Amino acid sequence: QAGCYKCHNASPEVPEAAAFNSGRDLIRIYGCFGCHKLPGYENIRKVGPDLSTVSGKLTKEWVRKWLANPKDFKSQARMPQFWWNSNNSGSTGNTNWDKRNAAEINAIAEYLWSKSKPKQLPPGRTNGNAVAGKQIVETVGCFGCHAIGPIQEAANQTQIRRSHGFNLENQGSKVSQSWIYNWVKDPTQVWPETKMPSLRLTDEEAANVAAYLSSLKNPEWEQRPLPEIDQAALDDVTLELLRTNSTDIEAHEKLKDMTAEQKNLFAGERLISRYGCFGCHNVPGFEKAQPIGTELTEAGSKLISQLDFGFLPIEHSRRAWYEQKLKDPRIFDVGRVKRPEELLKMPNFRFSDKDVEAVSGVLVSLVKDPVPLEMRDKTPQAVADGRQFIAEKNCRGCHLIEGVGGDIRPTKEQAQWPPNLNTEGFKTQPLWLHSFLKDPGSVKLRPWLTARMPTFHFTEQQAATIERYFSALDRVDYPFISTDVETDTQRLSVGADLFMKLQCTSCHPTSNAIPPGKSPEDLAPNLQLAHERLRPDWVLQWVRDPQKIFPGTRMPTFFPPNDKGVPVSPFPNILGGDVTAQIQAIRDHLFITVGGGRRAPRSGTVTK
């Protein structure tokens, strides 16, 4: 699949290329573009949290333990390991790496705390019920983006989407219950640029969720002692960094005049610059810093002679080198004598073998060989833009789109599955979809669902990107549509009769209330909204053959085909048994009468 990119470089995914798509997804969620220039990742937000307010969220002690080895705290951590790797462990020459690493980590933490300006958040409620909170987390849709504890290897797109948000394990050993309350209540008040949407939790629900998440702890981590900071090691680090812009004599003189605090702040700032922390995080003082990694735009065409294989007995090929670099980025330093500042800096992501195979496959696909225009991917721009956007928002974590996704389904009963969005462009009217995307909490389409469509606070342009995507995918008009339906009184009467005979309201409520005695397994979407929500032509096809649109749907087929494949009506004496006429009558009754006597709009327009 490494050759896919040559033709599909404008598309965020390639059909039937699971490994290649997984590799591109891994590059996106691990933030490789933060250090390396990579085509297709130019305008994506940094993947790590904002560190300008870190002291209001975490303790300095927690940060020091975390930086030492993120996966010690969280098995699914995406933060890579910078210290205690192949080239900075044990002792080499005059360097005791245990002492030096601890000094470097502490210096970075001290710098971050010196620049941190925590937000003044309201006091969070800490009187929640953890049992109730667990139920909320398991039902409202958190597992579309989050997991708790270990999950399968991530070189699988389902698990990648389940890892879209951070893993929730051990949260009680990381942040306070009050902070969690404010975060789940309104993520944007804590971090305006967050990807986390709002689930519109009530105060009580937020308090319960905070109580549950704060109960997830790692006692061993909390009790683990921090190493003492060796002042000689701090001096060595500071002196080395001073030498980059001073003579040896000048560096020693400057070091003599520095306090321990000054050494930490100076070293912390320079180390952040060396390791490129700002590639993933917003770090005060580094707002205009440039990525530190090698450009990978043409990684697949790089000359073998430009790759340093060190002393490793591996095949001298691009693929072998990239695979080794991803498995252990600094192993090429082994056996060499280097000063600390000369060592390789790329951190270790602890990728699985499948991850390595997927990401390296993408890298070797990035070639400069020109491809004739007629051979390139012809995906419409609206579809390509939409696919990119739904990947960034992880819509497939909950929804089935283009036959892919719905990853939350294994955690729920079928009646609680979020809706299938195949044919969404042909199905929904643009104005309704626009309104729903902007304010999903105002619509009670499936009141029995426990999972909630989150409020993403979409801009007009973002909502329009989704609408154009679905419309282009289904090749339907956008934003103007015709919604003409029959208003003949006799036709509406026939439609009402068929509507009653088919017992449509036995499954479809016509109000926001759940009918007495009904369980979620019995219910289907509220039909009172059909006249403003659905496209008339889609309704005709849906009623004629629901299984053709959504295989496996619970919607029954009322007009089954005969031996010749022709749909047959169960009511041969109504409209002469004409299936098309009967379905049109049902649709017209649905739009005019069930819709409250209001005619559906003839056309609609939204932001282009």
Image (tube, rainbow, N blue to C red):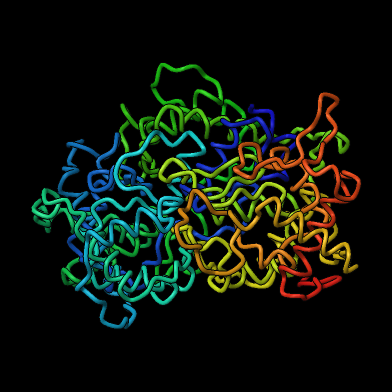
User: Residue at the location (34% across, 60% down)?
Assistant: 136
Q: Nearer the viewer, residue 208 or 519?
A: 519
Which percent across, then down, holds residue 175? 24, 64
Which percent across, then down, holds residue 319? 54, 25
Is any part of residue 300 visible from this angle?
yes
Left/right placement of residue 567 relative to residue 208 reads right
Q: Quadrant of residue 558?
A: top right
Left/right placement of residue 71 relative to residue 504 reads left
Left/right placement of residue 587 relative to residue 85 reads right
Is 75 situated above or below 452?
above
User: Residue at the location (74% across, 67% down)?
Assistant: 531
Q: Nearer the viewer, residue 250 or 110?
A: 110
Quarter of the rendering occupied by the C terminus? bottom right
Q: Quadrant of residue 564?
A: top right
Is 392 situated above or below 7?
below
User: Residue at the location (59% across, 62% down)?
Assistant: 509
Which percent across, then down, holds residue 579? 85, 44
Q: Nearer the viewer, residue 353 or 143?
A: 143
